[in-house]
Image: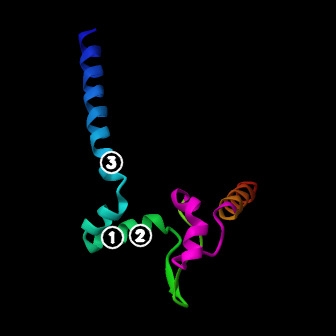
């Protein structure tokens, strides 16, 4: 019982520490600004898994990361980013492709 209580206390401390750090982790622009060039590249590779290109004055990507899909229209209206393959279609096609490949 003592060990159980100790673990529960450690868990509560851990959760408290994580909650204190969370606001900083959610500030992606600040993290990006403070990051080294190697870290910035890693962030871009994670957010734009299918690549990011610059063509005709606008950034383009085949699809957006799920966390940014809700901003698709705003990005496009501002001319900041065009996703050439809408997120929903990308995932639907991926699932269909995986289902097809698993049947062979």
Q: Is residue 91 left or right of residue 4?
A: right
Q: Residue at x 44, y 64 (%)?
A: 46
Q: Judge whether 15 appears above or below 24 on screen.
A: above
Q: Few, some or many C-alpha atoms within 10 Å of disc 2 (few <14, some 14-19, many ≥20)?
A: some
Work out whether mark 1 precedes mark 3 in sequence or the reverse, and give the earlier one: 3
Q: Judge whether 3 appears above or below 86 on screen.
A: above
Membership of 63 in magenta stretch: no
Which residue lies under the disc numbered 3? 23
Tell me which segment is drawn in magenta: 66-88
Q: Quadrant of residue 81?
A: bottom right
Which callout, 2 or 3, points to the residue nearer the camera? 3
Q: Residue at x 28, y 74 (%)?
A: 37
Position of the N terminus by quadrant:
top left
Which residue lies under the disc numbered 2? 44
Residue 61 in view in this figure: no
Which residue lies under the disc numbered 1? 40
Work out whether mark 2 precedes mark 3 in sequence or the reverse, and give the earlier one: 3
């Amino acid at each position: 019982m003592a060990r159980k209580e100790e673990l529960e206390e450690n868990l509560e401390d851990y959760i408290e520490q994580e909650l204190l750090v969370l606001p900083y982790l959610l500030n992606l622009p600040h993290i990006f600004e403070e990051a080294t060039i190697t870290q910035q590249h890693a962030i871009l590779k994670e957010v734009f898994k299918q690549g990011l290109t610059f063509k005709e004055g606008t950034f383009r990507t085949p699809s957006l990361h799920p966390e940014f899909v809700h901003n698709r229209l705003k990005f496009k209206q501002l001319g900041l980013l065009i996703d050439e393959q809408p997120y929903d279609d990308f995932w639907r096609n991926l699932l269909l492709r995986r289902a097809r490949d698993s049947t062979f």
